């Protein structure tokens, strides 16, 4: 014999008909757990943007109608647990993404190619005259590093720098052969100055009349 739910009425009590954070935060996962399979629409691109708000607004009604609840407290406690689970998932997810993004500058700056670039820049008298002896790099930098198992590789950087006298951006391109990095291009553009400081241009990139090829 089928077990009859104690919430015989499909009409949810007014005190339970509130915004459902579990449905909003976990959408389709919450839907499967609460027999509310319309929540699977949240898996459809673009539709999901609207659906998560629909679930937040109507989730409690659907969960009440589709579930088996001993009483109002049972329903309230279950939905509260879903909300807590959703919050934990989002906090962990956002924290993980932030940690991943925040680690990128450390990875780039920990490479020998980056250190070689900055060593040359810090030793150049023209750069020190334009930026200052206290020149330092910003935390956020651009670029990429690719190193093959064979010992070859390629590295390109766009490094904002600043000091007491000014600001600028370093553009560098290095290649790796037999485990050793060599500088192919190193240019510093000083903010407010048209002509860049060219420290290295082994591939004869046209500067400044053409875009720097990195």
Image (cartoon, helix red, strand yellow):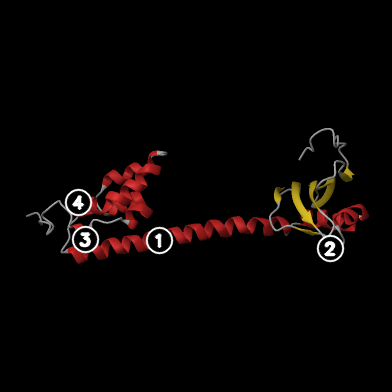
Mark drawn on residue 182:
none
Q: Which quarter of the picture shows residue 46? A: top left
Q: CA distance from mark 2 to mark 1?
A: 44 Å
User: Which of pointers 4 and 2 lies earlier in the amino acid sequence?
Assistant: 4
Residue at the right extreme, as displayed:
125
Visible residue check, residue 147: no
The residue beneath circle 1 is: 87
Of tags 3 and 2, which is closer to the observer? Answer: 3
The mark tally for this picture is 4
Side of 11 where 137 appears, left or right: right
User: Which of pointers 4 and 1 lies earlier in the amino acid sequence?
Assistant: 4
The residue beneath circle 4 is: 66
Q: CA distance from mark 3 to mark 2?
A: 64 Å
Mark drawn on residue 15:
3
Expressed as whole percent of the image width and height from the top left, the position of residue 70 reads 15, 63
User: Which of pointers 2 and 1 lies earlier in the amino acid sequence?
Assistant: 1
């Amino acid at each position: 014999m089928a077990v009859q739910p104690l919430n015989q009425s499909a009409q949810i009590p007014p005190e339970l008909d509130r915004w459902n954070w579990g449905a909003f935060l976990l959408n389709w996962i919450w839907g499967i757990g609460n027999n509310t399979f319309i929540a699977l629409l949240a898996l459809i691109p673009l539709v999901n943007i609207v659906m998560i708000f629909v679930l937040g607004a109507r989730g409690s009604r659907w969960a009440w109608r589709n579930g088996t609840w001993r009483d109002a407290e049972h329903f309230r406690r279950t939905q509260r647990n879903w909300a807590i689970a959703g919050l934990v998932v989002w906090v962990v997810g956002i924290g993980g993404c932030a940690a991943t993004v925040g680690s990128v500058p450390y990875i780039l700056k920990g490479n020998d190619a980056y250190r070689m670039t900055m060593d040359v820049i810090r030793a150049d008298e023209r750069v020190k005259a334009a930026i200052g002896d206290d020149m330092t790099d910003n935390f956020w930098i651009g670029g990429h590093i690719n190193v093959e198992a064979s010992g070859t590789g390629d590295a390109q950087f766009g490094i904002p720098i600043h000091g007491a006298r000014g600001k600028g951006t370093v553009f560098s391109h290095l290649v790796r052969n037999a485990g050793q990095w060599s500088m192919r291009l190193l240019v510093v553009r000083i903010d407010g100055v048209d002509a860049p400081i060219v420290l290295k241009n082994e591939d004869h990139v046209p500067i400044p009349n053409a875009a720097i090829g990195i």
